[in-house]
Amino acid sequence: MDLAEALQTRDLRLTRPRQLVWDVLTSGDHHLTAADIAAEVHRRDGSVNLSSVYRALSLFADLRLARESRLGSPEGSHWEAAHADDVIHLVCESCGEVQHHHGDQIDHLRSHLGSDHGFEATWFDVVVHGRCGECR
Amino acid sequence: MDLAEALQTRDLRLTRPRQLVWDVLTSGDHHLTAADIAAEVHRRDGSVNLSSVYRALSLFADLRLARESRLGSPEGSHWEAAHADDVIHLVCESCGEVQHHHGDQIDHLRSHLGSDHGFEATWFDVVVHGRCGECR
DNA sequence: GACCTTATTGCAAGTGATTCGCAGCCACTC
DNA sequence: GAGTGGCTGCGAATCACTTGCAATAAGGTC
């Protein structure tokens, strides 16, 4: 995933705030809140404004480079670099950990919805709450 | 689903605002926003305050009588009376319609996660965005 | 490198959904 | 019907996020 390229083909500019937000998004933890991202970006460069972080995030979302998911937590939404949409988020209610689960269930679901119900799925947001193996 | 009973067994009171919110939630459309509900409640009884609507909704959510789902729309979250959790929300990006899809995929997923991955699922929030049969 | 165009930013004020504190009210019990 | 404490209405507060605007700086052109 090359940020510079993705931007340049659309006459968008690769700026410092965008680069920093992208760095934070692609390195380290998944599922950061906008505030987390802003804090980390600000730590790396104190001159970057909160608005720019929000603007970068929603730009990345438009370009399908990043993805916003509401995991049901009270504090705002969580962000992660884009990944295939056949991913299930497993949210542990005990330790708060969010796992990604890859499987073919989503594909089954997609074809089932398409062929049996005429619904053409674009993207999936599957969140399962429960207790993870560690916490049971 | 008897509201009075659910409340009384927990030493909670059946008040007019709660009754009205419940009426709106169980009659007519699904997936109302808090604002929709507040508006309808207010139409039926102008003396009911917005805060009370929010308080009733979150109480019902605690009691598992109602359910909040974030369907990805910019205006706040959507509410519906509780239903079995094996429901998939199909959100049409064209007409905005939200359909419920009942199927056994959720059950398959639950047992798959449990037996193969040690994840004990409590509840599911499955939202699929796409185009419905009408809009294709 | 200097210059130019205009996308992008920082700032500060604004928005809109939701929450909270508190004094008064009323649902339910005895 | 009196008491009590759970609830409500109200208004102010919060919180995540957005926006308007003048200043700034990418990235192309010469």
Image (spheres, coloured by chain):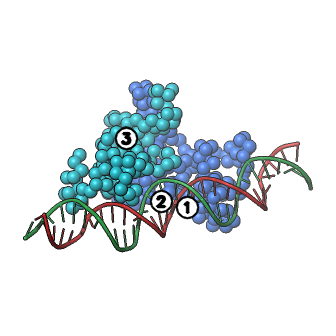
Chain colours: A cyan, B blue, C red, D green
Where is residue A63? Give x, y as percent. Answer: 28, 54
Mark 3 = which residue?
Answer: A30
Chain letter, disc 2 residue: B
Q: Is residue B99 above or below residue C30?
A: below
Q: Is residue B9 above or below residue C27?
A: above
User: Which mark identifies residue B99?
Assistant: none
Chain letter, disc 3 residue: A
Query: Do residues under tags 1 and 2 come within 8 Å of each other at their CB atoms?
Result: yes
Tell me what residue is drawn at x 52 percent, y 33 percent.
Answer: A94
Mark 1 = which residue?
Answer: B35
Tell me what residue is drawn at x 34 percent, y 39 percent.
Answer: A28
Query: Do residues under tags 3 and 2 come within 8 Å of each other at their CB atoms?
Result: no
Task: Answer with left or right where residue A124 lies relative to residue B110.
Answer: left
Q: Nearer the viewer, residue C25 or D16?
A: D16
Where is residue B34? Give x, y as percent. Answer: 55, 58
Query: Do residues under tags 1 and 3 come within 8 Å of each other at their CB atoms?
Result: no
Q: CA distance from mark 1 to mark 3?
A: 32 Å
